[in-house]
Amino acid sequence: MEGLDNFSPTQEWEGVSALFEEESVKEPPKKRSRLRAGAEAFRPKSPTTTKQVTPALEAGKRSREELKAASQKMQIRKVTAKLRAEAASFRPSQKPKEPEGLPPVSVPTPKRAPRQEPTSMELGEYVREDAELLKRVGWPDFVKHLRSRSDFASLDEVHHPARRLLNFYKHRGAPVKLATEPWTSDRVHAALNRGPHKSCAEYIEFLREEFVDMRGKMQWTVLPISAVQHLPGLRISPPGVVPQRDRRPRWIVDYSFSGVNADTLAIAAVDSMQFGHALDRILREILLSDPNMGPVQMLKVDISDGFYRVNMNIEDIPKLGVAFPTEPGQEKLVAFPLVLPMGWKNSPPIFSTATETVADLANQRLSMSTHPLPHKMDDAAEAVASPTPPIHPAVPIQSILRAPKRGLTSYRPQVRSHQRVHWRGKHVVPHVGTPVPERRDPCLPRRCQPAAYVDVFVDDFVALAQQYNNSRRVRRTLMHAIDSVLRPLDEYDDAARR
């Protein structure tokens, strides 16, 4: 058909038609049986002629070889199926022997450093050292140098749908994706010239102490604008200070004023924030517990430095810059969070992904009725005596329903005594409420096991338990679940980590 490429469509059609006619003229080959083919090829042996092998015998010989090869393959399949069945039922011993003759394996470990208190430095010294280090190594290596190991554990014992997301936060950090274009240099300098909120003017020394402490813990860093104005995606947001009664002031970052929160894409697991009804769930478990198994004991565990347990993505840190307050005439300073900052839109759902996973793991393990191993903090928690509940005399509860001062216009109440009043056709006894029930409602379902439940409100875990042995089991299960997601302290951590 290669020669038809140079012909016209008419000539090509005629050539193809001629080829089809030639093929149709040919007679189809007759079917010949195997016996007829062997009979036609049969030649009697003659003593004078040499021995010749006919094509039919060669075909029969090849077929026998093929059958032999097929039988060998069948035997191999049987042996393979037998080995697979034995491998499926194989159970290794509990103490496998180490292979002999292998060279020792050297596993790199972090540098062991003695736990000592961090040296006290002024904020100006930190600013100078960090600016020189940034100029020498660049932004990615600068952040890696300041930031210590991740607070996430190995996550090997986390059998949860959120494991993949937590592993991403562990190795890559929390991302900051914005819907708008990066700020121009003029807008950055305009935000710096505006500066922080006016509430910071009265608490400059407090902010310096806070940032010195957070810089010592590798949570924040403060740099001059001349050293960071070239960073891609730089944005500046104003900070503020909120005074609190009988407590230290609290500093915050207003990412909403700068528009960062509005531009932030909601790529975090927003559904992980389930703390809106935590109190309802806890009261429900207490209500459904069986009072015959004893009182319900409660345990509260607080995660220290909650949001600061999750690192930020290195390339996205400049998007969350903060205008640090400075004295008139000084160079403008910019603070950058190395961890999740308070005030950013995606900080609560990202951190709640870790804490809600811990609560789910704890409840999952409690439902299996297993006895966890002792925890290293179990004895210290057991040494804390539980407060004895006070015994108060029975006091009638005041009702929130009060008798009306005057009746309706269409109905005049008839006062029969100084205690009873007719209101809307019903008798109302003022200042007397519904008495507290002394017996359990028979309509509530009964449980054959003592209460064991764990819930969380952001970074505060609340555990419920009945009976002494069960309370230790619930506490150990919660502690081990926390260690499965957030790694515990070890000898390689400095004194700043708690």
Image (cartoon, rainbow, N blue to C red):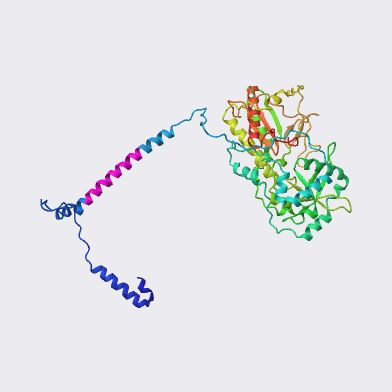
Q: Position of residue 85 (x, y in %)?
A: 40, 35
Q: Is residue 270 visible to the viewer in this orientation of the structure?
A: yes
Between residue 68 and residue 214, name the one nearer to us: 68
Residue visible at 74% across and 38% down in the picture: 305
- The answer to whether 29 is drawn above or below residue 424 in the figure is below
In the image, is residue 69 part of the stretch drawn in magenta? Answer: yes
Q: Position of residue 299 (x, y in %)?
A: 69, 29
In the image, is 125 to the left or to the right of 337?
A: right
In the image, is 40 to the left or to the right of 336?
A: left
Specify the segment rendered in magenta.
58-78
- The answer to whether 459 is drawn above or below residue 437 in the figure is below
The quarter of the rendered structure image containing the N terminus is bottom left
| Image quarter of residue 76 | top left
- The answer to whether 153 is drawn above or below residue 330 in the figure is above
Q: Position of residue 414 (x, y in %)?
A: 78, 34
- The answer to whether 332 is drawn above or below residue 212 in the figure is below
